[in-house]
Every structure is written in structure tokens, then in C-alpha cells.
Image (cartoon, grey):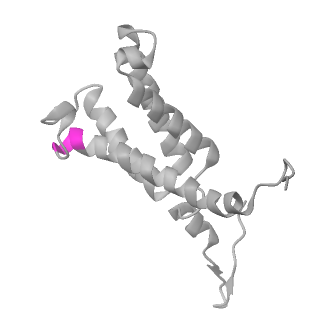
């Protein structure tokens, strides 16, 4: 049986929102873990131990972006803005730290920065998707002055 190219099989159609949400949550969570490690010395600390000195440029600021931005993306709150900032911070990290050590990420040790950069750029374009705080807030019914609830339509 052939499936027309414009129709996705049922499994893909039903699983896509779940996989999209899982990708957003996992990517944001992993990024937030990097920030927590650098700021608080947990999970192995910054680069294997310790913390980044407070207000040190760019390490401390990058860790704040990782913790806060990753958390927001994982929750699905201000997702597009947070994802663009996270993506930009990883592009900055790649070009300012890794690029001078070689052309390709496998050579210069920048695979993680490059992957996070592209993952967050994808999330910025796809948006929060299902199971996001933003999505839940958009679907919450508004209460009229007379006490009746009316669904709010946003798009």
C-alpha cells in the first residue's frame, strides 16, 4: 500500500506533537543542567568541578542564560524568545571559543555548542508546541464581566 506524499501515516500524525514536546523539554532541561553545574557546582560543576566566578564575562553570563533560558524552554514559557537567546549564546560560544581551534566541530571540541545552537534555532522556529505553559495559557477560558466563561481564541 502506498501512502500519498502529502499524508503522513497515522502514527506520525499522532506522535508528532508528543515528540516535539519531548524534544523541547529534554533540550531545555539538558541546557539548564549545564547552567546549574556552572553556577552552583552541582552535577560535576563547571568543566568537571567548581563554579564560574560571579559576573565573570562571558562564563557566568552564559551559565545564567543556560539555566534560565533552558528552564523557560523546558517549561514552554516565552519559548521562542528564550530559544533565540540560547541559540545565539551557543553560536557565540562556538565562534569565540571553539572555532579558533579548528574548522570542524569534531576537531575543535565544539560539537555540543553547535548542536545546542541548531536545536534551539529549530525550537525557536517550531514554537512551544504541545504540553507547554504558553499553550495551556492560550487555551484557558476568559471570564466575562457577568461571570460567564468564554473561550479565548488566539492565533
Where is residue 127? Give x, y as percent: 60, 50
Residue located 48% across and 44% down the image: 82
Q: Is residue 152 left or right of residue 123?
A: right
Q: Is residue 96 left or right of residue 119?
A: left
Where is residue 24? Give x, y as percent: 50, 51
Where is residue 73? Give x, y as percent: 46, 50
Residue located 84% across and 53% down the image: 3
In the image, residue 63 lies in the stretch drawn in magenta: no
Count of numbered tags: 0
Query: Do we see residue 52 in this rendering?
Result: no
Residue interval drawn in magenta: 37-41
Residue located 56% across and 44% down the image: 123
Instruction: Say which quarter of the image contains residue 137.
Output: bottom right
Q: Nearer the viewer, residue 107 or 73?
A: 107
- In the rendered view of the protein, which quadrant contains the C terminus? bottom right
The correct choice, above or below, for 148 with respect to 107 in the image is below
In the image, residue 40 lies in the stretch drawn in magenta: yes
Where is residue 116? Give x, y as percent: 45, 35
Q: Nearer the viewer, residue 128 or 3?
A: 3
The correct choice, above or below, for 51 with respect to 28 in the image is above
Instruction: Say which quarter of the image contains residue 58.
Output: top left
Q: Is residue 23 left or right of residue 111?
A: right
Q: Is residue 58 left or right of residue 117?
A: left
Q: Residue furthest bottom?
A: 147
Query: Do we see residue 133 in this rendering?
Result: yes
The correct choice, above or below, for 85 with respect to 132 in the image is above
Q: Main secondary structure of the magenta part?
A: helix
Q: Nearer the viewer, residue 77 or 5?
A: 5
Amino acid at each position: 500500500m502506498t501512502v500519498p506524499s502529502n499524508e503522513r501515516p497515522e502514527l506520525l500524525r499522532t506522535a508528532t506533537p508528543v515528540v516535539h514536546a519531548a524534544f523541547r523539554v529534554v533540550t531545555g532541561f539538558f541546557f539548564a543542567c549545564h547552567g546549574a553545574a556552572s553556577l552552583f557546582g552541582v552535577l560535576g560543576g563547571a568543566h568537571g568541578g567548581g563554579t564560574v566566578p560571579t559576573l565573570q564575562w562571558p562564563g557566568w553570563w552564559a551559565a545564567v542564560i543556560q539555566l534560565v533560558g533552558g528552564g523557560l524552554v523546558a517549561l514552554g514559557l516565552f519559548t521562542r524568545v528564550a530559544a533565540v537567546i540560547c541559540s545565539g549564546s551557543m553560536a557565540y560560544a562556538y565562534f569565540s571559543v571553539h572555532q579558533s581551534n579548528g574548522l570542524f566541530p569534531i576537531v575543535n571540541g565544539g560539537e555540543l555548542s553547535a548542536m545546542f545552537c541548531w536545536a534551539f534555532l529549530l525550537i525557536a522556529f517550531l514554537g512551544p508546541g504541545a504540553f507547554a505553559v504558553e499553550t495551556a495559557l492560550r487555551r484557558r477560558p476568559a471570564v466575562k464581566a457577568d461571570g460567564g466563561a468564554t473561550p479565548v481564541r488566539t492565533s
